[in-house]
């Protein structure tokens, strides 16, 4: 079984000068091969929630039902990663520089999201899959947008996947899908590297990144 988990960080706001909007938008895909590896990541999320967020010190607070990167301190992120450091998984990410691509109101956020997702997905070795491929996406789109997103990815990926290999896309709530919480942590770490120049969390898991691309790529200045 080939499991893929997709989440994003940042926003696709049109105007960079708008309050609270980000310069970068990150798509990250967590690739896990085999049910045992997927279960290991799921158990690590559960263990982190139980040991670090549901302990005695937190009984007076509303317990967190999921790991959210923006609300989780570095020490807890580090604890989580120690649980999965030996699990064979990979990360594929594309970082959109909005200042050079989407800073125009007439551009469709929906199409940009689909395109950036495709840029990341096409780098995965889906042609090597021998059995089922399941892509789980954090549920944030409406019904029609979900269907258009699925149709786009099916169309872009079908030539690379054997007809004998089933390919399914599900849109799940992250509090119900534990590995989606894991990819949320990783997407946020990549986003912080580009948006804020903060690489503390990124450096912990960077060895798991199989593909990282800034889009559009920066133009190198020619030598004098």
Image (tube, rainbow, N blue to C red):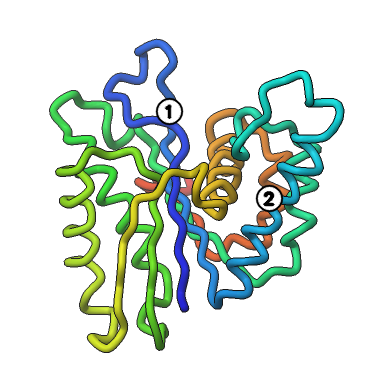
Residue 218 showing in the rendered view: no
Q: Residues within 10 Å of mark 2 (few under 14, many from 20)?
A: some
Residue 46 badge: 2
Quarter of the image holding residue 41?
bottom right
Q: Which one is in front, 112 or 86?
A: 86
Residue at 51% in and 50% down: 180
Q: Residue furthest top?
A: 19
Quarter of the image holding residue 83?
bottom right
Residue 105 lies, in percent from the top left, at: 18, 24
Residue 212 showing in the rendered view: yes
- In the image, taking residue 82 as reference, residue 95 lies left or right, namely left
- In the image, taking residue 54 as reference, residue 172 lies left or right, namely left
Q: Nearer the viewer, mark 2 or mark 1?
A: 2
Q: Residues within 10 Å of mark 1 (few under 14, many from 20)?
A: many
Question: Residues under labels 2 and 1: Cα distance?
Answer: 33 Å
Residue 81 lies, in percent from the top left, at: 74, 53
Q: Secondary structure at mark 2?
A: helix
CB under 8 Å between callouts 2 and 1? no
Q: Is residue 190 above or below residue 11?
A: below
Residue at 43% in and 34% down: 24
Q: Secondary structure at mark 1?
A: loop
Residue 10 lies, in percent from the top left, at: 44, 32
Q: Which one is in front, 36 or 186?
A: 36
Residue at 50% in and 51% down: 177
- In the image, taking residue 12 as reference, residue 9 lies left or right, namely right
Q: Which one is in front, 190 or 89?
A: 89
Residue 48 lies, in percent from the top left, at: 74, 46
Residue 41 badge: none
**Mark 1 = which residue?**
23
Quarter of the image holding residue 166?
bottom left
Q: Earlier in the sequence, mark 2 or mark 1?
A: 1
Q: Is residue 105 above or below residue 185?
A: above
């Amino acid at each position: 079984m080939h499991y893929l988990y997709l989440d994003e960080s940042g926003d696709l706001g049109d105007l960079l000068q708008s309050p609270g909007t980000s310069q970068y938008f990150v798509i990250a895909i967590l690739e896990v091969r085999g049910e045992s590896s997927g279960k290991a990541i799921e158990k690590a999320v559960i263990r982190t929630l139980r040991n670090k967020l549901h302990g005695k010190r937190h009984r007076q607070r509303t317990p967190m039902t999921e790991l959210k990167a923006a609300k989780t301190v570095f020490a807890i992120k580090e604890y989580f990663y120690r649980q999965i450091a030996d699990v064979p998984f990979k990360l594929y990410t594309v970082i959109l520089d909005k200042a050079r691509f989407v800073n125009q109101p007439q551009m469709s956020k929906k199409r940009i999201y689909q395109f950036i997702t495709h840029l990341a997905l096409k780098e995965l070795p889906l042609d090597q899959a021998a059995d089922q491929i399941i892509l789980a996406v954090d549920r944030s789109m409406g019904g029609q947008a979900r269907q258009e997103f699925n149709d786009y990815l099916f169309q872009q990926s079908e030539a690379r996947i054997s007809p004998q290999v089933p390919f399914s896309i599900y849109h799940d709530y992250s509090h119900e899908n534990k590995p989606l919480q894991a990819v949320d942590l990783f997407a946020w770490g990549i986003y912080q590297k580009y948006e804020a120049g903060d690489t503390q969390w990124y450096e912990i898991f960077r060895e798991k990144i199989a593909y990282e691309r800034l889009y559009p790529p920066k133009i190198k200045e020619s030598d004098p």
